Amino acid sequence: MSVFKAVEVFKDIWWVGAVDWAIRDFHGYATHRGTTYNAFLITGGKLTLIDTVKAPFKEEMLSRIASVADPKDIDIIVSNHAEMDHSALLPDMVELCRPAAVYASKMGARALAEHFHGDFATVVKSGDRVDLGGHTLSFFETRMLHWPDSMVTYLAGEQVLFSQDAFGMHLAGYERFADQVPEHLLKQESLKYFANILNPYAPQVKGLLDKLPSLGVAPKLILPDHGPAWRDGDDRIVQWYRDFATPTPSRKVVIAFDTMWGSTDKMARAAAEGVSAAGGEPRVMPLKACHRSDVATELMGAGGFMVGSPTLNNHLYPTVADCLTYVKGLRFTGLTAAAFGSYGWGGEAVKQVGDALTDMGCTVVEPVSVRFAPDQDVLSQCAALGRAVVERIPG
């Protein structure tokens, strides 16, 4: 008999997912605390599976399902999102169960067909309903939150929202509910998740939050595809998302840099002194020690972004290029920024950093660069640069 059991999270709704303790990289996002892949089984009518799990966890999911019902009896499958951590097992489940229907959005059905080279999904659109004989599913498309195919599923009578990648976080654990987890940890991991997954779509997030009540969606239980569930009307995550989606630039200044022989490091430290002296809050992030996704997390609510790089082979340093490429895709707005750095032969890197910051839409302050090691005069310029960034942050 398997040790993997389903967990009842609501009457007739069972968590049948998996816990991934080992994952530390989620397509470029450092998952320091692992994650969960949440799938849900609805009983009390047509046996329904909401999403699946990542492929290596197939047996764990099937074992949890089997602790409640025979997996072969699953009649309906819902695919809220076609990304592989949720849909990888759909072909296996279709072969095993021969379900009456696999429901997905129009874009979801297309993505699944192209990925798995088979047309097996039935398209649903916003407002469509499916009677399970005891429960009724409603579907609402949430395009670009965070893929074009994304949708959510709602049980109106029970006020249960299956929110796919919205309202989630990467956090491994046996705590199935948010009220079992310390609030500081919930907020930190949900902030990091938003910064690295949803921030490019912040306007759509705000629009969806404003629209849900008009659609009759007022959940008392939110079941995301990663992390703990939010029960008994706990709407902290909804309020946090409103704040995350409409940040007010603060006097926090993120200082991300790397160094070859210590000169750019000294410049970063001097810049941090200037930020602090001007009443700012420096976040010093040497890229030898700080992951790109942690830099992105600190940029949430920041007003300033300072980036330092030495020049290597006429280009900016690889870790700095990596960080800037990653952060650019996350579309942070309203940042006052500056470049700095040391060089030996040519000083191209500082200009390249400045160009990248301009491409990101930042308001860019005049940079500071130095050949070889900075003296006290250059360090004073770096401190002045830090002060200038703080002073130019709006508000």
Image: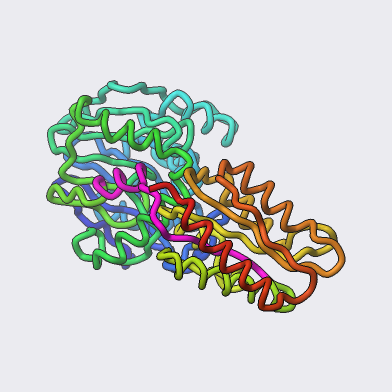
The spot of residue 155 in percent (x, y) is 20, 34
Horizontally, residue 311 falls left or right of residue 87, namely right
Nearest the viewer among 158 and 317 is 317
The spot of residue 106 in percent (x, y) is 45, 23
In the figure, 138 relative to 295: above or below? above
Extent of the magenta region: 238-258
Figure quadrant of residue 113: top right
Kindly identify the residue that appears in the image at 46 percent across and 48 percent down: 197
Nearest the viewer among 183 and 26 is 183
Horizontally, residue 380 falls left or right of residue 76, namely right
Horizontally, residue 89 falls left or right of residue 215, namely right
In the figure, 287 relative to 12: above or below? below
The spot of residue 27 in percent (x, y) is 56, 53
In the figure, 250 relative to 105: above or below? below
The spot of residue 227 in percent (x, y) is 33, 56
Q: Determine if the magenta segment contains residue 333.
A: no
Nearest the viewer among 1 and 241 is 241
Most extreme residue toward the front, as rendered?
A: 377
- Quadrant position of the N terminus in the picture: bottom left
Counting the numbered discs, the total is 0
Horizontally, residue 24 falls left or right of residue 172, namely right
Kindly identify the residue that appears in the image at 64 percent across and 50 percent down: 325
In the figure, 29 relative to 258: above or below? above
Q: Determine if the magenta segment contains residue 247.
A: yes
Is residue 265 visible in this depiction of the protein? yes
Is residue 102 visible in this depiction of the protein? no
